[in-house]
């Protein structure tokens, strides 16, 4: 085998390796933090790991999670970079893309520097950021954003809902046009703000204010309308858009139709849409407030449509949308236990459960299989967001590895996660398949269920311009005369 002279740092021996482009029975050798070789009988190495009977997979890439972030409602989430990324590693995820959240009045350059400093101090995963743009005034779009994009912050996030961070259609077009000029992707939380407000008002007026009324307040029509609008804006400007957290069957249809027209769209869904429905508010082992998220969980037919969308490639990846708030006065109940759902933070933890839930469904139970699992949870997010060296186990790639025991069975408990929220929204569910050993750039960071990483040991990964970020030539927006 080429490149095999001398001593390796680590050899993972006798497992089945999913490379991100297929699976082979092979040893995997690591040197200087990178995959050095794949093949039979590799060695010698300073450290041998026996992976007989195990699956050797790229570490997960979670391209949508909220960490140490101030929400639009002004509430700090329950995780620091240390607690969130501890949880990520324990669940087999080695790379995270969280948010640098601008609130109106803040300079983008300052916002990103602040979040970079927080991550440098605490993060144990390699990481990148989406820049939340909520204020396009001053030099934010003309100077700060281009400079940040040139420095490898090539993903921007916009909201069409939530008072403090929502931007209007004209501002969305400004951001798309700026991104197009500098090479990047624009991610959108797409729901129709007016439709949700109207539903909220009617629910509140009729006294329907419990957490289980929250899903009713975010009707599927709100999602369908805003997803469609974003697809049209992507086509009009030729600028690629990532549609975050598609939750319903019609949403998959919008993506499919837009792509059929040639619109530059990529899209994701999340485990709480694949594994929960709105009916879970009545039956889950956790308090209903702990299940509130936006868009909300839908129905069983939507779950099947999302799986079909993943199978056909209409949806590109599955992220956690980890949005951690404790079930106490620091989080969900900041305005009291009986506060109306309109005053409760949205979101649930998911960094640690994303991969085990999907592994169980896709590998153990067979939906889309091992290679599909790796593609949707590691390779595709790394490719779309331009995270070079991540999401694959081929020579030259970063040796981010999760070694899975496909026979390990675990039933989730009410408080068994390693993040800062203190609850597990999937409590009571049993999964088969668990990441027992995790390496980040060749260093063992989880072994025998114990963490062995130091806060701040994760590195920022600059985003490169990926094929998914390439704008389309000659879009209608460029033609000012008909
Ligand atoms: Zn989110």
Image (cartoon, rainbow, N blue to C red):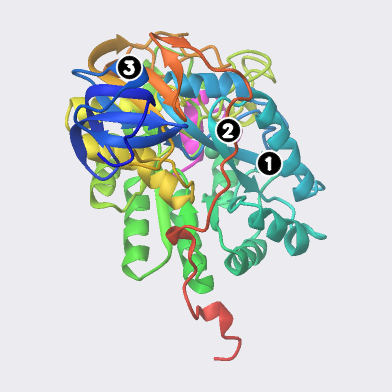
For the residues labelled 2 and 1, the Cα–Cα distance comes to 10 Å
Residue 179 percent across, percent down from the top left: 60, 63
Reading the image, the residue beneath label 2 is 66
In the rendered image, which quarter contains the N terminus? top left
Residue drawn at point x = 49 percent, y = 60 percent: 469
Q: Which residue is mark 3?
A: 48
Give whichever of discs 2 and 1 has the lower sequence position: 2
Determine the secondary structure under disc 1. strand
Tell me: residue 223, above or below residue 279. Answer: below
Q: On the image, which quarter does residue 74 sit in?
A: top right
Residue 208: % across, % down: 54, 28
Query: Can you tell which quarter of the image residue 436 is in?
Result: top left
Residue 98 shown in magenta:
no
Spot the residue most to the front: 6
- Residue visible at 69% across and 20% down? 335
Q: Is residue 55 above or below residue 170?
A: above
Q: Label 1 CB, ligand 1: below 8 Å?
A: no
User: Of discs 2 and 3, which sits in the foreground?
Assistant: 3
Please tell me how many numbered marks the rendered image carries: 3
Residue beneath label 1, please?
101
Q: Which residues are magenta?
A: 203-220
């Amino acid at each position: 085998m080429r490149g095999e002279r001398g001593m390796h740092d680590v050899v993972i021996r006798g497992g089945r390796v999913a490379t991100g482009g297929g699976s082979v029975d092979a040893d995997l050798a690591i040197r200087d933090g990178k995959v050095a070789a794949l093949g039979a009988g590799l060695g010698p190495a300073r450290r041998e790991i026996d992976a007989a009977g195990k699956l050797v997979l790229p570490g997960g890439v979670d391209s949508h999670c909220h960490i140490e972030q101030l929400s639009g409602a002004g509430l700090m989430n329950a995780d620091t970079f240390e607690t969130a990324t501890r949880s990520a590693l324990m669940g087999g995820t080695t790379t995270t893309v969280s948010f640098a959240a601008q609130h109106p009045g803040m300079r983008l350059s300052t916002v990103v520097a602040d979040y970079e400093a927080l991550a440098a101090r605490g993060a144990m995963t390699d990481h990148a950021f989406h820049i939340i743009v909520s204020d396009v005034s001053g030099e934010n779009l003309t100077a700060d954003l281009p400079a940040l994009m040139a420095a490898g912050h090539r993903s921007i996030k916009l909201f069409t809902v939530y008072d403090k961070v929502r931007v209007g259609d004209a501002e969305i077009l400004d951001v798309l046009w700026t991104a197009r000029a500098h090479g990047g992707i624009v991610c959108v939380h797409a729901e129709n703000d007016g439709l949700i407000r109207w539903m909220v008002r009617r629910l509140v007026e009729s006294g329907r204010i419990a957490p289980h009324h929250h899903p009713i307040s975010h009707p599927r029509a709100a999602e369908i309308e805003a997803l469609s609008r974003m697809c049209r804006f992507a086509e009009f400007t030729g600028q690629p858009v990532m549609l975050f957290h598609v939750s319903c069957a019609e949403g998959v249809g919008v993506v499919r139709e837009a792509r059929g027209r040639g619109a530059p769209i990529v899209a994701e869904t999340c485990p709480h849409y694949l594994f929960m429905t709105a009916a879970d508010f009545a039956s889950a082992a956790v308090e209903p407030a702990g299940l509130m998220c936006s868009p909300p969980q839908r129905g069983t037919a939507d779950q099947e449509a999302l799986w079909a969308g993943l199978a056909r490639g209409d949806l590109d990846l599955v992220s956690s949308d980890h949005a951690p708030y404790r079930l106490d006065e620091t989080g969900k109940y900041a305005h009291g236990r009986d506060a109306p759902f309109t005053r409760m933070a949205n979101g649930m933890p998911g960094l640690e459960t994303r991969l085990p839930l999907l592994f169980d469904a896709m590998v153990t139970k067979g939906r889309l299989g091992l290679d599909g699992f790796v593609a949707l949870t590691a390779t595709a997010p790394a490719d779309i967001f331009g995270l070079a060296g991540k999401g694959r186990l081929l020579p030259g790639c970063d040796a981010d590895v999760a070694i899975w025991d496909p026979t390990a069975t675990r039933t989730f408990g009410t408080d068994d996660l390693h993040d800062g929220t203190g609850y597990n929204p999937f409590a009571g569910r049993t999964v088969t398949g668990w990441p027992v050993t995790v390496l980040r750039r060749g260093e063992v960071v989880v072994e025998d269920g114990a963490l062995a990483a130091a806060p701040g040991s994760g590195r920022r990964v600059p985003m490169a311009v990926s094929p998914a970020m390439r704008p389309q030539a000659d879009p209608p927006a460029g033609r000012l005369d008909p």
